[in-house]
Each structure stands twice: as C-alpha cells, then as structure tokens.
C-alpha cells in the first residue's frame, strides 16, 4: 500500500473577530442595520437563579447532583443559577416535583411571599 502526499490548500479567506470589547461592525464605525440592541449577554431580570441555588443548597446537592436529579446538564444548572438562561417548561415541572417531594415551596412560584 502506498501513501499519497497530503494535499494542502491555500487560505483564501480570513475571518477576523473584532477586538475584545468591540461589537461586530463597530470597528468600522457602524453596527449592522438590523441590530437594535446590546451585543453583550444580559442576565435574567428575576431572582429565579437565586431561588434554584437556595433549593439546591437546602437539599445539600452539588450542581452536578442537582443536574442529574433533574435530567439536565451541570452547565444548565450553572446557567440558571447565574441568571444566563431560563429553564424549559419540562425542567420547571421537574423542579416543582423536586420541591413537592421535599415539601418545599415551589421555586417557580413568582408570587411567593417573603418570610
């Protein structure tokens, strides 16, 4: 069996990212016309992440163990707790079931009274 030499291709296009802290298009003095917001990730406005973390800590679970219990990834629980994403409807149901199982007030209840 003979080996053929590897073929190489010349790079004809280079995609450059804008410098750190500069939004796409901004280095050219403009943003894309269809864009009307902020390029940075924004955190969720409510305290759901705080409530999920409190629940996890009351259950003495790590993020990994909580994720396994709910059937999601560790990264998902981490993102909820840090306010980067919101859970799906299925995940919300799983969280409610977990609260019910341990006789805790549901963390998904936005009308919780402060105690």
Image: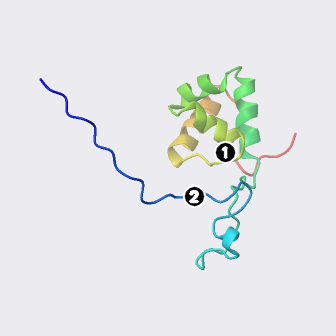
- From the top left corner, tell me how far across and down residue 43 is, in percent: 72, 52
Residue closest to the eye, 39 or 64: 39
Which residue position holds label 2? 16
Asked whether residue 41 is in view, the answer is yes
> Which labelled disc corresponds to residue 96?
none
Quarter occupied by the N terminus: top left
Circle 2 sits in a helix, a strand or a loop, which is it?
Answer: loop
Residue that protrudes farthest toward the left in the picture: 1
Residue closest to the eye, 49 or 90: 49
Identified at 64% across, 65% down, the residue is 24
- From the top left corner, tell me how far across and down residue 113 is, in percent: 82, 46
Describe residue 68's horizontal placement relative to residue 53 as left or right: left
Badge 2: few (under 14), some or many (20 or more) residues near its Cα, within 10 Å? few
- From the top left corner, tell me how far across and down residue 25 is, in percent: 64, 70
- From the top left corner, tell me how far across and down residue 57 is, in percent: 74, 25
Q: How is the image coloured?
A: rainbow
Of mark 2 and mark 1, the one earlier in the sequence is 2
Q: Quadrant of residue 82?
A: top right
């Amino acid at each position: 069996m003979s080996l053929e030499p590897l073929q190489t291709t010349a790079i004809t296009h280079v995609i450059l990212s804008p410098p750190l802290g500069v939004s796409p298009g901004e280095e050219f003095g403009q943003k894309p016309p269809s864009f009307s917001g902020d390029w940075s990730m924004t955190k969720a406005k409510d305290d759901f992440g705080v409530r999920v973390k409190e629940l996890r800590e009351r259950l003495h679970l790590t993020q990994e163990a909580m994720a396994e219990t709910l059937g999601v990834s560790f990264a998902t629980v981490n993102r909820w707790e840090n306010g980067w994403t919101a859970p799906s409807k299925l995940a919300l149901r799983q969280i409610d079931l977990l609260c019910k199982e341990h006789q805790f007030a549901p963390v998904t209840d936005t009308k919780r009274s402060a105690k």
